[in-house]
Image (cartoon, rainbow, N blue to C red):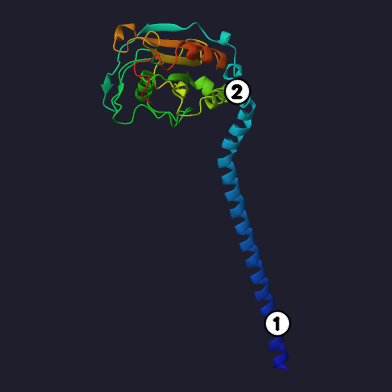
Amino acid sequence: MAKPAKNDRQAVIDSIRKKQKGADKRRGFAIVGVCSLVALLLIGAAAYQPIKDWWDLRKFNDIDISSIGAPASACQDITTKAANGSSEHVPTGQTVDYEDSPPAFGAHWNEANVAPDPMERKLYTAEDRPEVEALVHNLEHGYTVLWYDETAAADDEMMDDIRGIATKFKGTSNLRLKFKAVPWTEEDGEAFPDGQHIAYTHWSIGGAGNDVSDTSTQVGVWQYCAEPSGEALEDFMIEYPYMDSPEPNAM
């Protein structure tokens, strides 16, 4: 009679082992499933912003820059100021104290090192923007720089307009596309005038075709705007093209 009992006991043990293996397998599948879901969520989160930016920018594909953002009336009158600092290079890493917020001219980092910033990149955030001293060198080379303050950076609609404007300047072979859109933070200097969140700047020699060696005609140029205006920017860059700069043919 002992043998059947032994067989029954073994059957129970085998059944328990089988159930345990099944439970282990289901647990393993659950762990894999959760890990896969987490991985997909992480990938989705990383891809969300670029996809959203692409989706938001579609509306700018077939319109002129002048149709992006606010009308030119959102901007103040253009102002100028006698410029200095042409070819005044300081060692890369050295801080320069600029009087204006933002600067349109002045001493800047040495071209032989990391400045000016390459033409390929048009739009920056506070996390990856070149230092102001490098961007002033870009101004000397004929770039127009759109600066946006922290209020604009926090405004999705204004940032969409800035991204849309930046897409109109893609390219590196046409020097007319010398443009950068960069943030201006409280660490950089004083705030823009009250109610103004955008600033266009350019380093002019007093007119395209002027003698670049005559520094007496050089001026810094500013235009402040309450919000991004492609119309005002287009007018600004027509009046102050890349040729109207101390070093127009340098990249």
User: Farthest residue toward the front?
Assistant: 209
Q: Residue 187: which quarter of the image?
A: top left
Q: Where residue 117 is drawn, which disc sits there?
A: none
Q: Is residue 26 left or right of residue 183?
A: right
Q: Position of residue 18 (x, y in %)?
A: 67, 74
Residue 91 rendering spot, x and y as whole percentages: 26, 26
Q: Is residue 208 left or right of residue 52?
A: left
The N terminus sits in image quarter:
bottom right
**Total marks in image:** 2
- Which quadrant would residue 20 be assigned to in this image? bottom right
Tell me, yes or no, if residue 191 can be seen here: no
Q: Along the horizontal axis of the image, is 130 left or right of 55?
A: left
Tag 2: amino acid: Glu
Q: Nearer the viewer, residue 190 or 11?
A: 190
Q: Amino acid at mark 1?
A: Ala
Q: Position of residue 34 (x, y in %)?
A: 61, 54
* Residue 164 picture location, percent across and down: 57, 25
Give the crowd class for mark 1: few <14, some 14-19, many >=20 residues within 10 Å.
few
Image height of 189 relative to 55, above or below: above
Q: Residues within 10 Å of mark 2 (few under 14, many from 20)?
A: some
Q: Residue furthest bottom?
A: 1
Residue at x-position 70% and y-position 79%? 12
Sequence-wise first label, 1 or 2: 1
Q: Which residue is mark 2?
A: 157
Secondary element at tag 1 = helix
Residue 217 shows in this picture: yes
- 61 in relation to 46, above or below: above
- Which residue is labeled 1 in the image? 11
Q: Quadrant of residue 52?
A: top right
124, above or below 229, in the image: below
Q: Nearer the viewer, residue 121 or 213?
A: 213
Q: Nearer the viewer, residue 213 or 155?
A: 213
